[in-house]
Amino acid sequence: MSKIGEDNFYNKYNLKWVIPITIWTFVISIILSIFSESLVKRFDLVVAFIILLVIILIGIIFDVVGVAVTSANEKPFHAMAANKIPEAKIAIKLVRNAGKVSNFCNDVIGDISGILSGAISASIVIKLVESFSFINITIITILLTAFTASMTVGGKGIGKSIAMNNDERIVYWLAKILKFIEITFKIKFFPEKNNKSNK
């Protein structure tokens, strides 16, 4: 395959984005799984339930962000940019890269939070059985799985409505957060591309 054909293939299937995000998802999943499992094992049942709820909430929040970015229109942010509002440029780039942003928020973080909540639920079941030997493991597993699923689906359902009705506001506040991180930690989320042609 020629260099041009190879570049077209990578661009067509977005592999320059897909391959790194797949690797990062693998790494992040391992790190967060180890971290959450160690926390759940170290603390009591109440804290374990709180960790489970936090993981579910994180998945819902990122789902809201992903939907909002996909739904938002960039025109209002152009008006903000004209008024020299610093977050506007980031907001425009978020909307223009809605596919990648929603993939990261909805798929990467969403799937990781789903996997983690399942793993934490299993750890909670084990702790319950160890603490209360009379508990039926099958029943408690079914109940906890149903609870986790209903909280996730219900939360995301409500979140999608919020995202659709407040998309521009959510994107603006996300841009403010990213701008703060850029200034504080000197990180560029959307670096400027070098369009200079080779002479």
Image (spheres, grey):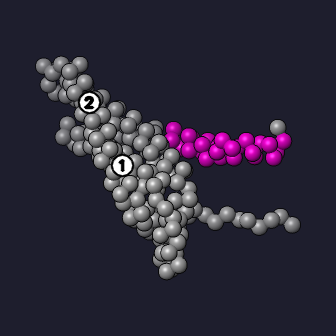
In this rendering, position of residue 107 left or right of residue 54: right
Q: Which residue is mark 1?
A: 160
Q: Main secondary structure of the magenta part?
A: helix
Label for residue 146? 2
| Residue at (28% x, 29% y) in the render | 145
Label 1 packing within 10 angstroms: few (<14), some (14-19), many (20+)? many
Q: Which amino acid type is shown beneath numbered disc 2?
A: Ala
Label 2 packing within 10 angstroms: few (<14), some (14-19), many (20+)? few
| Residue at (73% x, 41% y) in the render | 9
In the rendered image, residue 71, in percent from the top left (x then y), is placed at 45, 55
Circle 1 — which element?
Answer: helix
Q: Is residue 16 rendered magenta in the image? A: yes
In the rendered image, residue 150, in percent from the top left (x then y), is placed at 27, 36
Query: Sequence-wise, which precedes: disc 2 or disc 1?
Result: 2
In the rendered image, residue 178, in percent from the top left (x then y), is placed at 46, 64
C-alpha separation, residue under disc 2 versus residue under disc 1: 21 Å
Numbered label tally? 2
Image quadrant containing the C terminus: bottom right
